[in-house]
Image (tube, grey):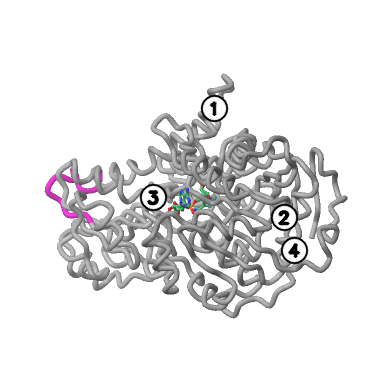
């Protein structure tokens, strides 16, 4: 474990054992049991803590009591089974809150139309937690939800008000932002790059460091379905003041968004010059200062976090009259990328009116059923508004789409072949594993015209072209083989 720190908790001086050397197991309440709360609860229960997951959604809680996660998240159901003896689910939880050593706040923080963060779930949860902060035992309320700088102070005030305490030190507020990725949430929580803890007082940092000790010291036997990655050492523990911890989360997401925006900008230019952006990305990513991740050009990012978190950061900037042009540009590039897929179709089909377009994938990324801000929805809406017929196939999230967007006139197919039937073009929207080895010959045989827009640059152009398709990637050059490709392959060996 590496301990770093800024602010009041100084570098290297955290004593994990000063909490109580005997205390290995903490009583923890997790308020909000969505993607983050449920994964946090399941992982901490697996690591030996006693967890109560509290959510106001009765259907969710009833399903969790039956052992169902209610979301598609690889390994989460198995982890819950392993941790079953240590985890309970409730819609109330007053007694559990009263007895908890640590309360983790993991409720939603959606965007308002102007980009500000809607904090009503945080306020309501803080009010409920505060009302149950009785007795003199010290406990920590850790905010895991992504919240704007200054929210920690607001939560502290709300807790004080609801608990009726004035200036008491029997609880401390901390910021403990979460960096998990949907689709690999269990893996990210058991083997994180870093754990960030923002505090006002040292006792809170020590309590949370002790809570996460099994992860920080990797003191657990990995579950068989989620082995420790080869070469994984220990995560860093970063301690800071609360505002810095809150900002770290936004800055991390803003940086990732900027990286994707940058490569998409280069891909746009590659479309004109004929250069292949996949080789450009590979080559620049080999520079350790740049790194390989988040350099895949295509239709861009979606999901529950990037959109709302960048909007929140831009809004924070405007509140202080502090312009953030790099981030603003990256967000704008992303908005355009979705429409570029439609432009490519229009160009290849000479207009999409009356055409049938098949979407391969709906989820915003593979291994999740999450449709929040999914590019597929914008692409489908745009195509429908232009008079096209839209079909879709997704291995996991079609039922979600039917339920959440009943007015979206998508025709759902049972598999990739029935999707291709009668289509003029296909768009690869989500790079699910099964879409990286499509039965292209069989699909081509049932299509009306053969155009394939590879929205994730996930396919091999010659393989697609071999089956008679017009292949349209994002910045993938002319599709011809060049001497340069040979050099790239040599470097792979
Ligand atoms: N999903 C991600 O990949 C991810 C990653 C990192 C951080 N985050 C952040 O974590 C937070 C939670 O995200 P999520 O995706 O889990 O959201 P979510 O919408 O899936 O879950 C939030 C849950 O909180 C519950 N809730 C709301 N108000 C409540 C209350 N007063 N009492 C009890 N339960 C209440 C809701 O019913 C819901 O089940 C957000 O701030 C998000 O930005 C999300």
Q: Which of marks 4 and 1 is in front?
A: 4
- Asked if residue 290 shows in the view, the reply is yes
- Cβ of mark 3 under 8 A from ligand 1: no
- Residue at left offset 38%, top offset 70%: 434
- Residue at left offset 16%, top offset 48%: 388
- Residue at left offset 26%, top offset 57%: 403
Q: Which of marks 2 and 1 is in front?
A: 2
- Which segment did they paint magenta? 347-357
Q: Distance between the residues labelled 3 and 2?
A: 31 Å
Q: Which label belongs to residue 213?
A: 4
Q: Is mark 2 in CB contact (under 8 Å) with mark 1?
A: no
Query: On screen, 50 above or below 235?
Result: below
Q: Is mark 3 in CB contact (under 8 Å) with mark 2?
A: no
**Quick one: 37 or 193, which is closer to the camera?**
37
Residue position marked by numbered label 3 in the rendering: 372
Q: Nearer the viewer, mark 3 or mark 1?
A: 3
**Quick one: 10 or 205, which is closer to the camera?**
205
Horizontally, residue 319 falls left or right of residue 289, namely left
Horizontally, residue 274 falls left or right of residue 240, namely left
Whichever of callouts 4 and 1 sits on the residue coming sooner in the sequence is 4
Q: Which of marks 4 and 3 is in front?
A: 4
């Amino acid at each position: 474990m590496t301990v770093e720190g800024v602010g009041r908790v100084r570098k290297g001086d955290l004593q994990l054992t000063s909490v109580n050397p005997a205390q290995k197991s903490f009583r923890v309440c997790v308020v909000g049991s969505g993607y983050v709360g449920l994964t946090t609860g399941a992982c901490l229960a697996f690591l030996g803590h006693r967890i109560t997951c509290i959510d106001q959604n009765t259907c969710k809680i009833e399903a969790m009591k039956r052992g169902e996660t209610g979301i598609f998240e690889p390994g989460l159901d198995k982890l819950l089974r392993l941790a079953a003896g240590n985890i309970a689910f409730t819609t109330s939880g007053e007694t559990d809150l009263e007895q908890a050593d640590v309360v983790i706040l993991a409720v939603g923080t959606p965007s308002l139309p102007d980009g500000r963060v809607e904090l009503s779930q945080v306020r309501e949860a803080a009010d409920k937690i505060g009302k149950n902060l009785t007795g003199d035992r010290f406990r920590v309320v850790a905010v895991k939800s992504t919240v704007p700088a200054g929210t920690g102070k607001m939560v502290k005030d709300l807790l004080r008000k609801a608990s009726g305490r004035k200036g008491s030190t029997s609880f401390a507020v901390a910021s403990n932002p979460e960096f998990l990725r949907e689709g690999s949430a269990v893996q990210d929580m058991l083997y994180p790059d870093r754990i960030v803890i923002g505090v006002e007082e040292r006792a809170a940092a020590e309590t949370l460091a002790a809570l996460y000790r099994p992860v920080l010291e990797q003191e657990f036997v990995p579950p068989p379905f989620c082995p420790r990655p080869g070469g994984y050492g220990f995560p860093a523990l970063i301690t800071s003041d609360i505002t810095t911890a809150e900002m770290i989360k936004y800055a991390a997401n803003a940086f990732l968004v900027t990286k994707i925006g940058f490569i998409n900008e280069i891909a746009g230019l590659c479309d004109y010059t004929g250069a292949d952006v996949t080789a450009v990305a590979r080559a620049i990513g080999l520079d350790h200062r740049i790194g390989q991740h988040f350099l895949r050009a295509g239709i861009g990012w979606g999901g529950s976090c990037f959109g709302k978190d960048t909007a929140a950061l831009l809004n924070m900037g405007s509140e202080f009259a502090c312009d953030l042009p790099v981030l603003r540009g990256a967000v704008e590039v992303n908005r355009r990328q979705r429409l570029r897929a439609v432009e490519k179709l229009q160009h290849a089909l000479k207009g999409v009116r009356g055409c049938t377009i098949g979407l391969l994938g709906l989820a915003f990324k593979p291994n999740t059923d999450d449709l929040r801000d999914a590019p597929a929805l914008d692409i489908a809406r745009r195509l429908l508004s232009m008079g096209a017929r839209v079909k879709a196939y997704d291995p996991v999230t079609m039922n979600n789409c039917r339920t959440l967007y009943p007015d979206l006139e998508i025709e759902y197919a049972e598999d990739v072949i029935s999707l291709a039937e009668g289509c003029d073009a296909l768009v690869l929207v989500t790079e699910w594993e099964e879409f990286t080895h499509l039965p292209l010959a069989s699909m081509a045989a049932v299509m009306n015209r053969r155009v394939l827009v590879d929205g994730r640059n996930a396919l091999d152009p010659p393989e697609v072209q071999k089956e008679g398709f017009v292949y349209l990637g994002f910045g993938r050059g002319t599709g011809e083989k060049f001497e340069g490709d040979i050099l790239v392959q040599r470097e792979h060996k």
